[in-house]
Image (spheres, coloured by chain):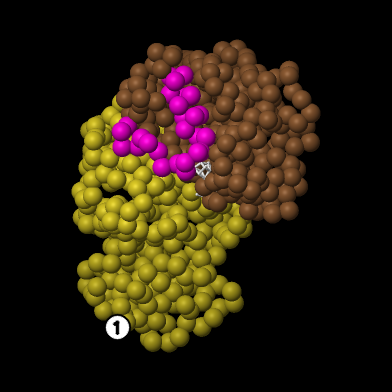
Amino acid sequence: MKRYLETGNFAITEGAILAGCRFFAGYPITPATEIAEAMSRRLPQVGGIYLQGEDECAALHLCIGASLGGYKAMTATSGPGYILYADPYGWAIGCEIPLVILNSGRVGPVSGITGAPGQGEFYLTRYPTQGGNYETIVLAPNSAQEAMAITVEAFYLSERFRTPVTVLADQLITDGFEDISVPENEDEMKDMGFRIWPRKINRGPNFYPPTDEIDIPPVVLGHNTGALCSDWTPTEEGYDIEEVEAHHKHAHRLIYKIRNHRELFSHLHEKKFMDDDPDLIVVSYGTPSRVVNTAVARARQEGLKVGALRLINLWPFPDEHFQKRNKYLVVELNWDGQLVREVQRAAGKDSEVHFTGCCGELPTVNDLIEIFEKILKGQPLARKGWQLEEW
Amino acid sequence: MDYLARKYLRPRKIPSTACSGCGLGINHKAVVQAIYELGLEVEDVVWGTSIGCAGRQTFGTWKGDGFAGTHGRVYAIARGLRLALPPEKKIILTVGDGDAFGIGLLHLIHAARCNADLTVIVNDNLGYMSTGGQYGWTTPYGSKTDSSPYGMFEQNLMSEGMDVLNILRYAGATFLARHVSMDGYRVVESIKKGIQNRGFSLIHIIYPCPTNFGSRELGTRSPLKIYKWIESKAAPLGEEKEETLWATGIYYDASNSRPEFSETIRKNIERIRRSTAA
Ligand SMILES: Cc1ncc(C[n+]2csc(CCOP(=O)(O)OP(=O)(O)O)c2C)c(N)n1
Ligand code: SF4
């Protein structure tokens, strides 16, 4: 094990390389530029390829081409670039191409503030392309060290499910310096819980079986398997077809291969002070969860019975955490409230769901504790300037 | 196409579902003929396509591996794939003019810029025809289409002395040719040269679309009329006449004169890998 004082960008790069990534195509954008830079330095050292795309749409298409040729491939960006993935993302979902995509959230809309953290793409990562009829996999780390592990896990899941996986980070995770341990051999990787799934080659002739099974090798071109992949609805062999029934089978697979294997995501969450049935559950993901964890620990010392639930697996959405009637507070790095809508849906009418959002900066521990107190006393959350809003 | 079809194409997709009288099949056959004459086998070629008539009618016809990209993006996909495939594998793309010269032009230029070993066959039916017949970036000045009902009057890539092949030449392409489908064996020869160039090759082939272009511009779906019309506006390079829109032949041949993209990348990665491992 080697220890570094380094950024999340460094950790993500090293995680990708450990997972077998040997192709990266990027496009400069704060706060993900340093991943591209690190990849350009590190990949050639291990025989891998770094390319700069003419734009993000090209970058992800380059990754698709490389993945179709057998590479484990990755790209990284922030909101303005992520939106340009809409076209290739859909193609990769439809053709079931394994890829890893990192999105480091900053403050939007559009270019917004480049150097501040944001969480404006919770739903965009669920619906990264048009057309519907698919499920997506999205994972959100909350530290540099975890970003490494989650990158490795993203590659693992992308191969098993044959689909792009988004790692949703934010500016503080990718830019922030932290203590990072990098495993140096397979045993150390195992000890850290890193799982690796090798690239396999589908030999056909049925490249798109209409089942919800996972672990079906993806299409790899160039091995004369007769593989076909296109942007149209495929037959099982990959021919384009304009038939509703064929599309039903295709859509069923794209949705249920993921929804029916939730057990592969169920460990991807963190609970703090949740064993004694807390009166208020504070829900968050990414960097704000670190403030939430501190605030909840402090609130406990002050006698408030609150617990913290951090989601790492955002999509498919883990409804199972919200089955019990309770009071929930959702803390996000946006003002419009995104995760809170999903929590409200999953928690149902009998639960009380509150929201507090920040924009471009983290909440403070004191502010959060004040909000916990108010909710527990049944008081309305008073507006506090621009900072805190009841949703 | 019999013997060629039996050797190289999938029975399921032959005959194609193109409109009767469509010239696309002539271009398609020329590509397969060129592959045959170069002695290539099914496993030597990965065949990519765009969408539209050009893409959909040729996708999945090749017996070997094939793909169809989203509109305009196949050049970026193919460039990624180029890096993953061994250099001796040929990547041949059959695409439409709207795809290559409209939505995909940026990616096309970048494929030429780095001299990626791809052979791009642009099947030009003079506009967007699978969507019913709208003008494109090579539609002749004055032509009526569904979106230029008063005649095409906007500047495009083939008007006022402009030529889209100039853009590609100065972007770095190493083989460029232009033909009309009726050029017969000359088309096959150009495609062969394009495939043999280890670098970026593009063969631009104007072909007749009787259903949409013909019916709007010429007022008839008669294949004969549009075949004759296209022929009358084409002449071999150097023999152009006043009415010539398309000078045909090899426009630019700098085959194998520039380092190829994937070779360059591989060579440099090997160099860096060795120097950093030491
Ligand atoms: C991003 C996107 N925009 C528009 C379309 C609709 N579309 C389908 S086929 C086509 C025409 C393409 O024209 P061209 O490449 O010239 O091919 P042709 O049909 O003329 O052979 C268009 C615009 C699409 N599929 N995707
Ligand atoms: S619309 Fe035109 S180009 Fe398309 S298949 Fe019909 S004739 Fe051919």
Where does residue A71 sit, x and y in percent of width and height?
A: 37, 31
Tell me: residue A311, above or below residue A203: below
Whether B33 is among the magenta residues is: yes
Label 1 amino acid? Asp
Number of residues whose C-alpha sits closer than 10 Å to that of mark 1, classed few (under 14), some (14–19) or many (20 or more): few
Ligand 1 closer than 8 Å to the CB at disc 1? no
Which residue corresponds to the image point at 50% horizontal and 35% vertical from the top-left?
Answer: B24
The chain drawn brown is chain what? B
Instruction: Give left or right: position of A337 versus B122.
Output: left
Pointer 1 residue? A350
Whether B124 is among the magenta residues is: no
Which residue corresponds to the image point at 28% horizontal and 56% vertical from the top-left?
Answer: A245
Q: Nearer the viewer, residue A327 or A369?
A: A327
Q: Nearer the viewer, residue A142 or A93?
A: A93
Where does residue A375 sit, x and y in percent of width and height?
A: 39, 81
Q: Quadrant of residue B246?
A: top right
Specify start and end residues of the magenta stretch as a single range.
B10-35
Which residue corresponds to the image point at 28% horizontal and 71% vertical from the top-left?
Answer: A322
